Amino acid sequence: MNTRRGFTLIELLVAISLATIITLLGVSLMRTSINSSVGNEEALKQSQAVRDTQRLIEYAWSGRQSNGFDAGKTQLEFISSQTATGSFPLRFVCQSGEHNDFALWFYQVSPPGERTDGPAPAGEMLLAGLSLCKFGWLQAPPDDKAVAVWREEWPADRVPPAVMRLDLATSRGPLPPLIFSASGA
């Protein structure tokens, strides 16, 4: 009797099914790995942007002058004596975006009374995709018994505060507050 050795149709179907399942698991694992890598890269870029923003504000704020100061919950404008920023007033603005998010912008503003014939200086977006962006101001206590208080608004008739806070949050959650103090404060 002549017997042929080979695979039955059921054995082939089982082998193809197992190969398909293993391939799908491998593709799924690769897709998850790529998505994780992209997410980590975006988080790293945003973290670097936050550090760069912190350095810029820290540098400018450390040389802030008492004239030309205007502050609120979503914007800050002041003149800095730091040479790299020039003598132009600087403006940092938290602007709302299209998707219920915020972006932090930086502008160099022409001083009041100075005529500019060209277009207004373009702003530079420092941070995008924020779920929270607001400034806070530390109000010194009136006496030694009181406690300093963080305010969201700063009266225009008062000297600039020595300490400022910037609260930021991304889609991943809130970031630690960035605290800035003026030199000599």
Image (cartoon, rainbow, N blue to C red):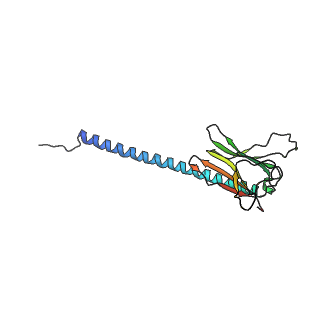
Image position, residue 2 (x, y; %):
14, 43
Q: Is residue 150 visible?
A: yes
- Number of numbered discs overlaid on the protein picture: 0
Residue at 36 percent of width and 46 percent of height: 22
Horizontal side, residue 32 vs residue 108: left or right: left
Image position, residue 161 (x, y; %):
76, 55
Image position, residue 164 (x, y; %):
71, 54
Q: Quadrant of the N terminus?
A: top left
The picture quadrant where one finds residue 7 is top left
Residue at 60 percent of width and 47 percent of height: 170
Q: Residue furthest top?
A: 98
| Camera-side residue of 152 and 179 | 152
Question: Is residue 138 shown above or below 93?
Answer: below
Q: Is residue 92 visible?
A: no
The picture quadrant where one finds residue 24 is top left
Horizontal side, residue 86 vs residue 127: left or right: right
Q: Quadrant of the C terminus?
A: bottom right
Q: Residue furthest front?
A: 145
Horizontal side, residue 52 vs residue 22: left or right: right
| Camera-side residue of 143 and 40 | 143
Question: Is residue 141 shown above or below 101?
Answer: below
| Camera-side residue of 6 and 98 | 98
Question: Is residue 1 shown above or below 66?
Answer: above
Residue at 80 percent of width and 45 percent of height: 109
| Camera-side residue of 99 and 35 | 99
Image position, residue 178 (x, y; %):
66, 55
